[in-house]
Image: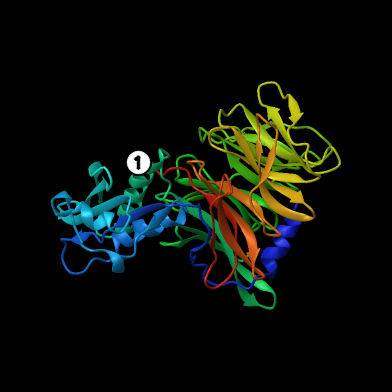
Amino acid sequence: MIRAALFILSILACSASWAQLTIEITKGRDNPTSIAIVPFGWKGVGAAQEDVAAIVEADLQRTGQFAPVSRDDMLGSPQDSSEVYYRDWRALNVDYLVVGKILPTPEGLVAEYEMFDVYTQRKVLSDRAMGDVKSLRGIAHEVSDKVYEKLTGIRGAFSTRLLYISAIERGSGEFTYRLLVSDVDGANESVVFESDDPLVTPSWAPDGEHIAYVSFETSRAAIFMHNLKTGVRTQLTNYKGLNGAPSWSPDGKQLAMVLSKDGSPDIYVMDIASRKLKRVTRHFAIDTEPSWMPDGKSLIYTSDRGGKPQIYQVTLANGYEERVTFEGDYNARARVVPDGSGIIMVHRNNGNYHIAMLDIERGSIQILTETSLDESPSIAPNGAMLLYATKYQGKGILAAVSLDGGVKFRLPSRFGEVREPAWSPYME
């Protein structure tokens, strides 16, 4: 596959151990909204295992759109509307104030929280988030989702998850590969699957429960389906030649993939229930990296049939194919934004590989990243941010950028390199 060899070499070259992620904000918006997240009251037994307000604060700050007020500057610690004195927060030039408390229930815990517009002195949000005693981080991310949506009009994606791949050197140039899953802030990281053979191109099903990825454990590349809840793995392909780049259809019933079993690498679609295959492209060139359009009626993919890697689109009903990208001599690994208005891709510019967005209606390309070897873009389900793999200080890390390029942050691992990120759908 195009750039597959490059990826394998890069992951084999890394010296990684447990790939716990951290957050480093590198660029935010001008004039971010000032917001105060007051420490939530705790009514449970003992001490709270997590600081819910701190997690909410970090979530909102990571978007680059909000400037949280330091706790050291707060003039009070209200937990509900009866304890809010607007003058205290106006003195700090706070735009919005979030207060709350966490209470035990027979089922677990509930966070009751409120948000106030300080200058109009109005309550603009009042809600509850529930979970068990071990899911305080999940409760916090749910609060972040609701606050973010209220203030931006865009659904929050803090409760979604990430997939990515790391490798652990065993010695003598041999590695153990790990497929990892975590919260979007890198917390609650766990190993989904571990192998002594390479793992690549993880992909989420729309249900958030199943994933697909490529493993080389059978002596050749093979596509596996994996249920995250049960741990059951199912091998879907093991054809001679290439088996790669699985991509789930919007309804989760089909899986697009690249196979070379009939000659050159082409795009196929598998019906998950019956395992029946339909060949979509037929060309002597390399067709690879399929991705679905939101309506499920067509696929975009990378092909070098014109001499250089470019993005093409094929309509599944009639097989009609057309070229999508024309600017630049390299465009690959395309992913469609949720509303279908743009295509995120790897774009070569002045010899460097960047993440760029093609505006489908206008045909214009906007370069979103500035580092030298950016790849594997994956878009948040709300279309506000995208995740990608890059290099920082000679080390493979994950990074994120808003779709307008205005907000950027890094998620480097603390102990090694990580690659191949995949952002989950909403987990409902």
| Residue 303 in which image quadrant | top right
Left or right of residue 268, residue 138 in this image = left
- The residue at 70%/29% (across/down) is 314
Residue 337 visible from this viewpoint: yes
- The residue at 30%/59% (across/down) is 92
Q: Position of residue 284 (x, y in %)?
A: 84, 37
On the rendered image, what quadrant is the C terminus found in? top left
Image height check: is 396 above or below 143? below
Q: Position of residue 29 (x, y in %)?
A: 50, 52
Q: Observer-nearest residue: 36 or 266? A: 36
Image height check: is 349 above or below 262? below
User: 10 Å neighbourhood of mark 1: few (<14), some, or many (≥20)?
Assistant: some
Q: Position of residue 23 (x, y in %)?
A: 48, 63
Q: Which residue is mark 1?
A: 150
Residue 2 visible from this viewpoint: no
Number of on-image labels: 1
Q: Residue furthest bottom?
A: 171
What colour scheme was applied to this rendering of the protein? rainbow
Q: Observer-nearest residue: 117 or 251? A: 117
| Residue 313 in which image quadrant | top right
Left or right of residue 17, residue 119 in this image = left
Secondary element under disc 1, as helix, strand or loop, is helix
Image height check: is 219 above or below 328? below
Q: Observer-nearest residue: 239 or 354? A: 354
- The residue at 57%/71% (across/down) is 416
Image height check: is 291 above or below 32? above
At label 1, which amino acid type do we have? Lys
Q: Observer-nearest residue: 74 or 239? A: 74
